[in-house]
Image: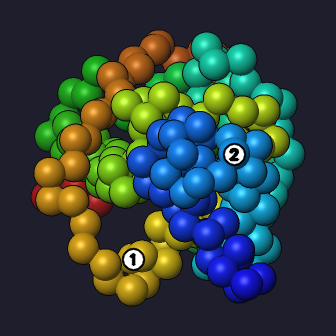
Amino acid sequence: MRNLIHFSKVLVTVRYLAKASFFSECGDLHGISRASVSRAVDAVTKSICHRLDNIHFPTDLPMLWPNGQDHDAFMFENSSLKANIEARTDGWLLGDSAYGLKKYMMTPKLNPSTPAEENYNETHSKTRVVVERALGVCKSRFRCLHKSGGMLLFSPGKCVQIITAVMKLHNMCLEMRLPQDPDVDVQIPDQVLLPPNPARVDQTGQAVRLRLIQRFDN
């Protein structure tokens, strides 16, 4: 009987993550109360976060909660993730020009004037498409993250818990090679093009980007 109760909790949680229906609707389908659905989702997502270890990137770094209107660059600047990334030497992050050009953060070249600079910008943009499609696949599989599902109307801490659980489940699906939706709607955010702020000019970042651009000079 106890195993059946746990099984029901998992089913309720998976349905919510996949369909993003109201807790009351999930409860009606499984014959339990809205409060029971809430407790099940909390317990199961917390267990997933604890038991699944398939995210090899810092996810437990504290940051100031955004107000929903801040640009990603502001959120990054005010997170402990920035310090972690600054210490890494195994690649680069890509950002639009709202981000400061750094040795670890590559931004587009404003007003490209050579074929190499144009090719660099084109590759930068294409890479963003790959990232956005990956996010689109995850949102398509777990509609609780998609705007069509009503988004996550919880406290910031609860949202982080659910998002982390979803990402771990998504990685598990990839590892198991489960089918993906071939018609994922990929929405690419508009590229933010801002003139460089002299106070934010980073000579090392400029040198790194120049070396990358030179790779496209052929």
Nearer the viewer's eye, disc 2 or disc 1? 2
**Residue drawn at (51%, 40%), measured in percent from left and top?**
25
Q: Residues within 10 Å of mark 1 (few under 14, many from 20)?
A: few
Question: Could you tell me if residue 114 is visible in this image?
Answer: yes
Give the SS element for disc 1: helix
Q: Front-most of 213 and 58? A: 58
**Picture layout, residue 9 above or below residue 108:** below
Residue 33: image tag: 2
> Where's the C terminus, which quadrant?
bottom left
How far across and how far down the image is residue 176, in percent? 39, 86
Give the answer, above or below, for where 198 lies relative to 218: above
Taking depth in this image into account, of 23 and 146 the one nearest to the observer is 23
* Nearer the observer, 47 or 163: 47
Q: Secondary structure at mark 2?
A: loop
At 31% from the left and 78% from the top, the residue drawn is 178
Tell me the residue that label 1 is attached to: 174
Q: Quadrant of the N terminus?
A: bottom right
Amino acid type indicated by mark 2: Ser
Real-space Cα distance between discs 2 and 1? 33 Å
Q: Position of residue 216 (x, y in %)?
A: 23, 55
Does residue 86 appear to the left or right of 186 in the view shown? right
Coordinates of residue 62 in the picture (x, y in percent): 86, 45
Residue type at numbered disc 1: Leu
